[in-house]
Amino acid sequence: MIKIITTSVLVLVGSVFAGGTFVPDKSVDYKMMYTAEGENLGFQVFFPKNHRSTDKRPVILFFFGGGWTGGTPKRFYQQARGVAKRGLVAISVDYRTKKSHGTTPFECVKDGKSAIRWVRQHADELGIDPNKIVAAGGSAGGHVAACTGVISGHEEEGEDLAISSLPNVMILYNPVIDTTEAGYGLSKVGEDRKTEISPCHHVRKGLPPTLIFHGTVDTTVPFENVERFSKLMKDAGNTCRLVPFNGKTHGFFNGSFFRPGSSDDDFNATMEGSLEFLLELWFPKTQKRPNIVFIMADDMGYGDPGCYNPESKIPTPNMDKLAKQGALFTDAHSSASVCTPSRYGALTGRYCWRTRLKKEVLWITFDEPLIEKDRMTVASLLKENGYTTACIGKWHLGMNFYKNDSDEFARGKNKHMYGKKGVKDVDFSRAAEYSPNDLGFDYSFISGAGHNMEPHCFILNRKPAILPTEWREAKTPTLPDSSGRESHEGWMSPGWIDENADVEFTKKTVEFIEQAHTQNPDKPFFIYLTPVAPHRPCVPTEEFNGETGVGRREDFVAQFDWTVGEVVKVLDRLKISDNTLIIVTSDNGAVAGGKGHSSSGKLKGKKSSLSEGGHRVPFIARWPDKIKKGHVNDTPLCLTGLLATCADLVQKKLPADAGEDSFSFLPALLGKENKNQKNLSIVHHSYFGTFAIRIGDWKLIPGGKTLFNMKTDPYEKTNLYNEQPEKVKMLSDALAKYKKSGRSR
């Protein structure tokens, strides 16, 4: 296998390609023909160190230039020795010229084909792979090499034509590629035969992959020739890479061995580029799986980020920049219009209404866990496929903490939704069960159900980071002049401050990324980051309090944007952004905004509802290696699709008992047209346990007897329920089917 050295290229390449002696390891006759020197046509062969005839190495044949008139195989000795040091067998080929044999370019082409055929026929004794033969050459030698791959016929009589003379790859240095008056060589091939061996005039589908190096001010072979040839090759569906060398003339690629005193810089660059091209073709790197960072806000609406709402009162520079660097989706949806069921759907690829939770949310950390231990999650899927996984932020899917001196689990009281009747009998010294660590996450640093629900503490890998020993009363802020709205009573860690929750989650995320990358840079990571912002109580830090001049909620959204920025900064600083898929979204729609700010934009409805404002959410994705910059996509998608998307990323098929409602949105991320995604089925679910269904452009809310065409009426102003009975029936039947069958995919 070729080894490409990527550090300090010029120095290392120079040490490989320049200097030293360039004596062939072996001379071989390949064509029995009397020459002026009384010898047959031969090869000068250069072998890698310790090469054996049992090896199966690639081989590259170099054809010298000289206008088909003269020249010597020594012209390519430096290149041949250099590539031999890098693991290829290299051959500098002698062929007939006008001076040596009184021949024309047509005989040169025949010799080139004979050389390829002979090497393939003797592959076993040479220790080469007959399916990895490269024809290379410069100037007229580049023409010979190109003709072996492009021109049909012109085979030497008496040879075994059952053995192919077609190379597998062509690498051409300032090649003669057009022998008409538009190029070079018309006087040597003749007017009546000017296109017969002119590669530009014989391009067709199925030709070998080709790499061309050419000086832009070449006065012998016009640069236009190779530009035209390259376009013809690509138009025919062939691989052809043209590398221009600005300001360079004919023969710029020659090294100091053939032209003493000249610089080897251009020579080195062409040789390194040649080997990299072959490496890509024959030894493609397995694309490292991307790091995945999934950031989900709590109650951020469609109208909050500036990139979604030009009239937003909230500065969101980091999300706006991310959208410009990646893709912005205009028709993305959470699987429910409130947080617990939406989070369940995102992690499992299954609608939460299929569980015991038919409406509302979990009201306490101590609720019975919703995700079964044997159910596949995004984290368990990725962990099984080589990822390091982390859960940081609000969990809100239930955990089993033990009671004191008991094997029973602590559970919440009835009507805990009002924030009263906190649970006092909890043994925090024992590890919790059904934590994120039991569901595929290697590391977790969470709040059990958000900063407003008990216990008020950070939970690190199943145990509180600081034991909760203080009792907090309901609706009590943790700082003066702050908010305690929707805060529940319960145990609290000493020093707990609501305002610090997202600051700590952000800090832990940055630390995790740094540690994961530093300890094992070749192992990808997955982070499920779920800040509490902008959920009530809206408690922005002092830095962001008053940032918008609109209200605490809007300030909290600005702080969420800061979190996004901090994550992006560490990815950029570590130089791992290019192969990191970062998604920024929200678990559901927003509550009402303040002072003229429309948190849902122009969408109808808010959090908890079946209207678009309840579940249509921002969705921004950046993955520089794969996602086109500034791409705006109206393809419908649902957050339940995260599991199937990750399965596609690791090239695994989901089992039948996993991701029952998960449809991959990877094609949409990559900007590929996908009819199935355009006609995606999404079942919407409200806080109150009611349903809506979307298929393609049509959305039905059965309980309200409303039908909307979302393509023409995204703001749900025109009810078509009575005008489109066939659509109503189609959607109603589909919803009934999905409920009964236990799956929608």
Image (cartoon, rainbow, N blue to C red):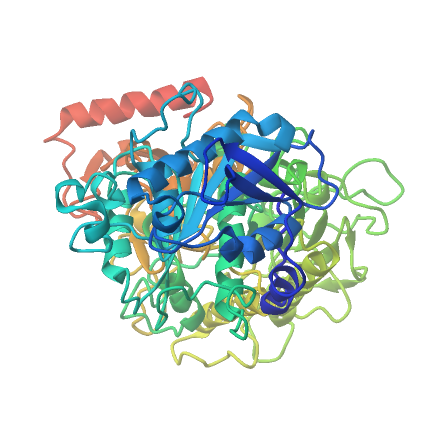
Q: State whether residue 526 is above or below residue 155.
A: below
Q: State whether residue 406 is above or below residue 500.
A: above
Q: In which quarter of the image is residue 710?
A: top left
Q: State whether residue 518 is above or below residue 722.
A: below
**In the current view of this chain or complex, which residue is farthest to the right?**
405
Q: Where is residue 194 in the image (x, y as percent from the top left)?
A: 18, 44
The C terminus: image quadrant: top left
Q: Is residue 606 visible?
A: no
Decide if residue 121 is on the left or right side of residue 145. right
Q: State whether residue 502 is above or below residue 717.
A: below
The residue at 63%/76% (across/down) is 479
Decide if residue 712 is on the left or right side of residue 693. left
Decide if residue 506 is on the left or right side of residue 64. right
* Closer to us: 87 or 287: 87
Disc count in the image? 0
* Closer to us: 615 or 13: 13
The N terminus: image quadrant: top right
Q: Position of residue 441 (x, y in %)?
A: 68, 45
Q: Is residue 80 visible?
A: yes
Q: Where is residue 70 in the image (x, y as percent from the top left)?
A: 39, 54
Q: Where is residue 71 in the image (x, y as percent from the top left)?
A: 43, 55
* Closer to us: 335 or 452: 335
The residue at 54%/51% (across/down) is 275
The residue at 57%/76% (across/down) is 541
Decide if residue 161 is on the left or right side of residue 193. right
